[in-house]
Image (cartoon, helix red, strand yellow):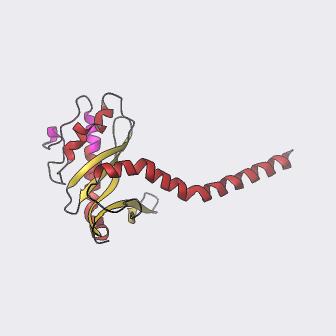
Amino acid sequence: MVVVLTVICGASGLTLSFVKQVTEEPREYSYLKFVKEPSIKAVLSGYDNDPIKDRIILTIGKDEKGQPLEKQFFPAKQGGKVIAVAFDASAVGYGGPISVMVGVDNQGVVDAISIMSHSETPGLGARAVEPSFTGQFKGLNLSGALNLTRNGGKVEAISGATVSSGAVVRAVREALDLLPKIQQEVFSS
């Protein structure tokens, strides 16, 4: 019985690893198409290309284990020239990480943001997805205006959800902090 069970487990493991390897690319494309693409379309406008197909993968540093850390950037092109780029960033809110897609023009000004995922409290922090909150980021850059009003900025926090509001601001700031490091590669492609 031990031999039979070992053979069955070994065959199952090999089959699963083969299926994972074969389906890795289609699963990645599905994730991009159905999770990230709606957010990309929400933060970019005026482009005539497919940002998903034209995506750029850049190494932006190393993780805590010393491995290269790669990030995807989705360029919006008009007439072959990159006019804006969308990429994601995240910060920890009240209920966990909040993933934000940020659309930025070549001057470092936010075109729009879209909340991709969160686990915030319904009716409070979950209101961060509402256009009345996300619309406040349009036209902001890394200046002091990109902060909550209580910290001297222009972003009005959601009532009862200051932690969630602050997390979205931190995610957008993180994205804009990254922009100078990748601007040459992204906007010259």
Residue 152 position in % (x across, y down): 12, 43
Residue 37 position in % (x across, y down): 39, 51
Q: Is residue 148 above or below residue 29?
A: above
Residue 144 position in % (x across, y down): 14, 50
- In depth, the one of 182 and 73 nearer the eye is 73
Q: Is residue 15 above or below residue 169?
A: below
Residue 171 position in % (x across, y down): 30, 48
Q: Decide if residue 58 is on the left or right side of residue 146.
A: right
Q: Decide if residue 37 is on the left or right side of residue 183.
A: right
Q: Residue at point 42% right, 61% down?
A: 69
Q: Is residue 9 visible?
A: yes
Q: Is residue 89 visible?
A: no
Judge whether residue 177 is colored magenta: no
Indicate the quadrant containing the N terminus: top left, top right, bottom left or bottom right: top right
Which quadrant of the figure has residue 155? Answer: top left
The prevailing secondary structure element of the residues shown in magenta is: loop
Q: Which residues are magenta?
A: 144-168
Q: Decide if residue 59 is on the left or right side of residue 176.
A: right
**Name of the residue lying farthest toward the left:** 152
Judge whether residue 160 is colored magenta: yes
- In depth, the one of 35 and 122 nearer the eye is 35
Which quadrant of the figure has residue 159? Answer: top left
How many numbered marks, from 0 up?
A: 0
Q: Residue at point 33% right, 39% down?
A: 93
Indicate the quadrant containing the C terminus: top left, top right, bottom left or bottom right: bottom left
- In depth, the one of 184 and 170 nearer the eye is 184
